[in-house]
Image (cartoon, helix red, strand yellow):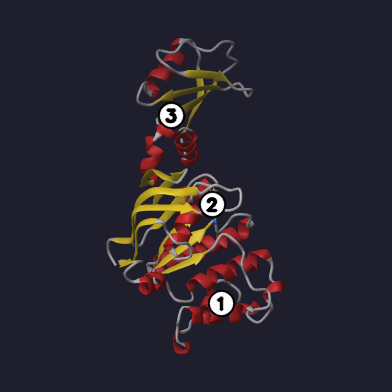
Amino acid sequence: MTGNAIEIEGLTKTYAASGSQPPKEALKGIDLDIPAGSIFGLLGPNGAGKSTLINIMAGLVLKTRGKVSIWGFDQDVNPRQSRASIGVMPQELNIDPFFTPRAALEVQAGLYGVPKSQRITDRVLKAIGLEDKADAYARNLSGGMRRRLLLGKALVHRPQVLVLDEPTAGVDIELRQMLWANIRRLNEEMGTTIILTTHYLEEAQEMCGEIAIINHGELIARDSTSALIGRMDAKTLVIQPEGEVASLPEMPGPVESCLRPDGSLCFTYRRSEIGTGAVIEAVRNAGISIGDVATEEPNLEDVFVALTSSKTAA
Ligand code: ADP
Ligand code: MG
């Protein structure tokens, strides 16, 4: 498919009141298109509504209002095709301890109506590196193995869209790298569209070409990762002077200057307000000879903090 793997329009979700808990408006009118073939990041602080959004896409949570299409199938018009087009690796480890990985994959395939002759159980076991544990009881699997099994369960019906909710939270680095290698391969070789939420912004920056940020149930940004980072105007210049510097040089505009414990000078400014050349010039004019210069560029973390810490920032 060319075009969008997911199309969401005016999506709202209000969880009903329960006990002393008032109703909760978890999604407040989300419009979002996710291009087919992309690795798309869905970011937001805890409680923002990420899992709610993902679980609605997967047909696991009922929406309150709005339109959701998966792979061109409107959930309300073609619920079966829409569900068959998406696989979800959930945030919680919900694995039946009495099933072996092979049995768990077979049961899952059965739930999706995959005929026995078309099952790819062995291929999935191999892809998630559980071939040698295929017939071990799940209760004997390590946490990392259980996570891989969850990924496997999301793949049994060969979905065009794979959704991963915090797939690497609390997972060691080795497993994280293995999961990412697997996911990249699915994207490159099978063209599977990948949607993921992650707390590791560095990871999102590295993996995702495009990103949406949600906060308090609202979409507050949606752009290519590089454009989002480019929005951050701040830049820091670090200068290592030759010899010691007693006082900070006068600056020709709004620049925040500091002297670091290692003797280097740092200057933070807005690229739109003042050029790097002017800052260096001012340092030279103060009679400081420059040994070395480095810049610190903003990253996705800076963008995220700026957007989610104040609602007006978007
Ligand atoms: P995220 O995945 O971004 O952390 P969630 O989608 O899990 O956010 O939650 C969004 C909001 O909806 C939170 O305030 C959460 O407490 C609330 N919420 C989530 N699930 C339920 C539920 N089953 N019943 C009531 N409120 C819920
Ligand atoms: Mg969540």
In the image, 261: left or right of 152?
Answer: right
Q: Which mark is residue 165?
A: none
Q: Name the residue under label 1.
A: 125
Does the rendering let one see residue 232?
no
Give neighbour class at mark 3: few <14, some 14-19, many 20+ (Cα, 10 Å).
some
Q: Mark 2 points at which residue?
A: 17
Percent of width and height locating residue 24: 50, 48
Residues under numbered marks 3 and 2 in contact, where contact means CB atoms less than 8 Å apart? no
Q: Which of marks 1 and 2 is in front?
A: 2
Q: Which badge, 1 or 2, is on the more N-terminal residue?
A: 2
For the residue labelled by badge 3, is the local secondary structure a helix, a strand or a loop? Answer: strand
For the residue labelled by badge 1, is the local secondary structure a helix, a strand or a loop? Answer: helix
Percent of width and height locating residue 171: 63, 57
C-alpha separation, residue under disc 1 versus residue under disc 2 = 42 Å
Q: Which amino acid does label 2 sit on?
A: Ala
In the image, 191: left or right of 300?
Answer: left
C-alpha separation, residue under disc 3 versus residue under disc 2 = 43 Å
Q: Which amino acid does label 1 sit on?
A: Leu
Q: Nearer the viewer, residue 11 or 193?
A: 11
C-alpha separation, residue under disc 1 versus residue under disc 3 = 47 Å
Q: Is residue 271 above or below residue 165?
A: above
For the residue labelled by badge 2, is the local secondary structure a helix, a strand or a loop? Answer: loop
Give neighbour class at mark 2: few <14, some 14-19, many 20+ (Cα, 10 Å).
few
Does the rendering let one see residue 226?
yes
- Quadrant for the C terminus, please: top left
Q: Mark 3 points at which residue?
A: 234
Q: Which amino acid does label 3 sit on?
A: Ala
